[in-house]
Image (spheres, rainbow, N blue to C red):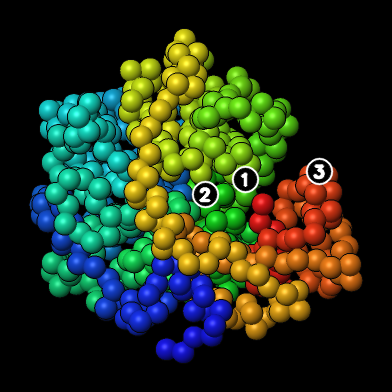
């Protein structure tokens, strides 16, 4: 392969050795036959496949119990479509209510399943931390297959405590020999489907490659859940985007229309900023099952897609109201942020946590009040300070009602009487930094995080040079360019949007956009002599657009 000097520079910045052509080829041009890993190598998957086959043959009642976010819900759609393809009807989808039931499995739901004589429960994107709930289910005749990607609970000796399920499919569990350790929840569910069809495809008369049509859901979840976009995840994301360009799901097409997404040119930004917020809005503002219905293969899904649009608008307004009362200045002295408000619902706390974390770069815990006024619901995002949020919550689990998540994000519940103790714990929290590992990572980087560029070189040709590195995401971040201004450069600003909440800055005719930029941010941008930007393609205007990096 021939690379320009810029492309070589970027490859080196991403840790590639330019002499290792095969490694670079695999990254830039993922190939299905070459790069898809063997699903059968995942621990627990063979037993799970055998148990599902037995359940189908005996016509057992099956429950698919999925998380309520933009990972669990697409995963539920994957298993729904799979069982329908098997022509099996004795199954139901269960997605817990975010506010009333909270994260993960819950005893009330399991008791309901026992009465309904359910004999197999398959989780999607949850379950690895639900020790008591799964024990209760198994003791009462319900086999549980856990498909999850979150970190297991650790004991005081850092040993994993796994639920006593029939089987567990989670590449982060001890003893798993699969090569990809960072699958999202929907991908994990898809791997189960893939393994089943590899063994029983002919018996159920399912055509070769049918499961590829489920990759639209895998692609959405892989991008939305911020798993590392490299290795097999990059393959799944890239093929997922290809299927999204061809998908005929009526509700999903309506979501594209509502979000003004050009299906033929859909990219990872369309997922992150258009599709995922609408799917997540269902659980934040109403019933998460509505997002599931919106992604199914039927005409009724269109009505649910329109409901998601309304939920998303309400979510935006509630989040905007919450952000107006946040005092960022008081966070300067805090090591780890803990904030909350009794007016904040569990539906928006994750968005507030992300916003604060993005602004102050520190690990942020945010709480709000749900149906039970005494039990506060919380969300956490990891900052640039190197903290593992699950490790933090594990160390103070004696203060928490429950918790779960992975290294970078999670959720928790805490009794309001423990809030002050939790604040004290976070103030005093210490973690032993792995300096050797940090130094090793720094040695890999051969250029700064940005690339110096003249304004005159910011054009479509430059965009074409960097687009080979897409899809961008976690651990394959967008390329940042640094532009220095001179006295001859001309800046012009205008506000746009329904409430003029967005900002467009013209720089010598080049358009730059920042969404939800307040007046203070506008003044800051217009006074800058140096800009840090990403480049994106504007499908509507058919030209490049700059996005300002904070």
Measuring 19% from the left and 40% from the top, which residue is drawn there?
144
The total of numbered circles placed on residues is 3
Pointer 1: what residue? 312
Q: Earlier in the sequence, mark 1 or mark 3?
A: 1
Measuring 73% from the left and 55% from the top, which residue is drawn there?
514
Q: Is residue 60 left or right of residue 355?
A: left
Q: Earlier in the sequence, mark 2 or mark 1?
A: 2
Pointer 2: what residue? 279
Measuring 24% from the left and 76% from the top, which residue is drawn there?
208
Pointer 3: what residue? 520
| Figure quadrant of the N terminus | bottom left
Q: Is residue 421 left or right of residue 171?
A: right
Which x, y percent locates residue 356?
61, 37
Asked if 299 appears above or below 517 in the picture, the reply is below
Which x, y percent locates residue 357?
57, 39
Alpha-carbon span between mark 2 and mark 1: 8 Å
């Amino acid at each position: 392969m021939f690379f320009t000097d810029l492309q070589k520079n970027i490859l080196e910045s991403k840790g590639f050795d330019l002499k290792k052509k095969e490694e670079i080829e695999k990254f830039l041009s993922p190939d299905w036959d070459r790069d898809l890993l063997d699903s059968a190598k995942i621990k627990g998957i063979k037993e799970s496949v055998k148990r599902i086959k037995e359940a189908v043959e005996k016509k057992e009642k099956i429950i698919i119990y999925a998380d309520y976010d933009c990972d669990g819900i697409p995963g539920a759609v994957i298993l729904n479509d799979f069982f329908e393809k098997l022509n099996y009807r004795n199954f139901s989808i269960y997605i817990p209510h975010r506010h009333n039931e909270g994260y993960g499995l819950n005893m009330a739901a399991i008791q309901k399943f026992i009465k309904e004589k359910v004999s197999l429960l398959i989780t999607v994107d949850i379950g690895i931390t639900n020790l008591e709930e799964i024990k209760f289910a198994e003791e009462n005749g319900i086999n549980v297959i856990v498909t999850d990607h979150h970190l297991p609970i650790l004991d005081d000796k850092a040993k994993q405590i796994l639920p006593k399920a029939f089987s567990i499919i989670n590449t982060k569990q001890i003893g798993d020999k699969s090569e990809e350790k960072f699958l999202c929840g929907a991908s994990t569910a898809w791997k189960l489907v893939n393994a089943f069809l590899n063994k029983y495809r002919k018996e159920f008369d399912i055509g070769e490659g049918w499961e590829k049509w489920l990759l639209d859901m895998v692609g959405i979840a892989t991008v939305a859940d911020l798993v590392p976009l490299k290795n097999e995840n990059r393959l799944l994301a890239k093929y997922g985007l290809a299927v999204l360009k061809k998908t005929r799901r009526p509700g999903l097409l309506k979501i594209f229309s509502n979000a003004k997404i050009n299906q033929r040119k859909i990219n990872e930004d369309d997922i992150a900023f258009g599709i995922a917020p609408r799917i997540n809005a269902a659980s934040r503002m109403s019933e998460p099952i509505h997002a599931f219905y919106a992604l199914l293969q039927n005409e009724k899904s269109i009505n649910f897609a329109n409901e998601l649009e309304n939920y998303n608008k309400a979510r935006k307004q509630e989040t905007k109201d919450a952000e107006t009362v946040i005092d960022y200045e008081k966070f300067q002295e805090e090591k780890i942020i803990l904030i909350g408000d009794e007016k904040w619902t569990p539906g928006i706390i994750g968005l507030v946590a992300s916003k604060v974390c993005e602004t102050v770069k520190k690990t942020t815990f945010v709480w709000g009040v749900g149906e039970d006024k005494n039990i506060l619901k919380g969300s956490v995002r990891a900052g640039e300070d190197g903290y593992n949020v699950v490790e933090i919550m594990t160390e103070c689990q004696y203060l928490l009602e429950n918790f779960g998540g992975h290294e970078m994000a999670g959720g928790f519940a805490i009794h309001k009487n423990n809030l002050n103790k939790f604040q004290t714990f976070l103030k005093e929290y210490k973690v032993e930094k792995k300096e050797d590992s940090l130094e090793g990572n720094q040695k890999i980087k051969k250029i700064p995080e940005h690339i110096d560029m003249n304004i005159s070189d910011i054009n479509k040709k430059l965009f074409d040079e960097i687009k080979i590195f897409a899809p961008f995401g976690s651990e394959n971040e967008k390329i940042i360019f640094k532009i220095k201004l001179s006295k001859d450069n001309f800046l012009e600003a205008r506000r746009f949007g329904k409430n003029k909440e967005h900002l467009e800055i013209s720089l010598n005719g080049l358009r730059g956009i920042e969404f939800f930029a307040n007046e203070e941010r506008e003044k800051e941008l217009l006074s800058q002599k140096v800009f840090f930007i990403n480049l994106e393609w504007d499908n509507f205007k058919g030209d490049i657009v700059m996005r300002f990096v904070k």
